[in-house]
Amino acid sequence: MAETFSFDVSSKVDLQEVDNALNQARKEVGQRYDFKNARADIECDRTNGSITLTADDTYKLNALWEIVTTRLVRRQVPVKNFKAEAIEQAAGGAVRQVHTLQQGIPAEAAREIVKLIKDRKLRKVQASIQGDQVRVASPSKDELQAVMQILREHDFGVTLQFGNYR
């Protein structure tokens, strides 16, 4: 019987790194001249996995998100996993925007990954959805490497990580 190799495709974000990046962003906002005497709040809700940005106007809100994304990228947090909601009015004439964090691969993206692997008709490659990740198995390590390359080239709306390679 041939030995089967496998790996898991997942999309996880380290919430501690997000907290560190937001703390750095808060410090930078406190030091910047264009935010002096202006309302600029960054709030993180770890239970819901969201970041709420509040500013005086949309210009400052966009500048605030730019600062946050810069800090997230420096800490190697995938910004692609944040989905921005519509800008809404807040109290006192301010504006607010919520950015929701996507932990794990969404169901539609997981189905798309499995379909892409099956459409390539790679020899004896099996893909199965297991919760918020996808397990890919094959008796050939070379085929698994080819699948990794295919998945890296395609955009699924979230950052993919490959792990548990056995």
Image (spheres, grey):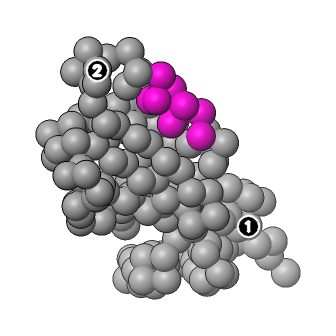
The answer, for residue 57, to whether it is visible in the render is yes
Q: Mark 2, mark 1: which one is toward the viewer?
A: 2
- Mark carried by residue 69: none
Which SS class for mark 2? loop
- Residue located farthest toward the right when viewing the structure as drawn: 1
Q: Is residue 93 left or right of residue 113?
A: left
Q: Looking at the image, is 130 positioned above or below residue 99?
A: below
Q: Looking at the image, is 114 positioned above or below residue 68?
A: below
Q: Looking at the image, is 70 positioned above or below residue 46?
A: above
Residue type at the position of mark 1: Phe
The structure residue drawn at horizontal position 42% and vertical position 53%, both measured from the top left corner, is 52
Residue tagged 2: 36
Q: Which residues are magenta?
A: 19-27
Most prominent secondary structure in the magenta stretch? helix
Residue tagged 1: 5
Picture quarter with the C terminus: bottom right
Tell me which numbered mark, 2 or 1, is placed earlier along the sequence.
Answer: 1
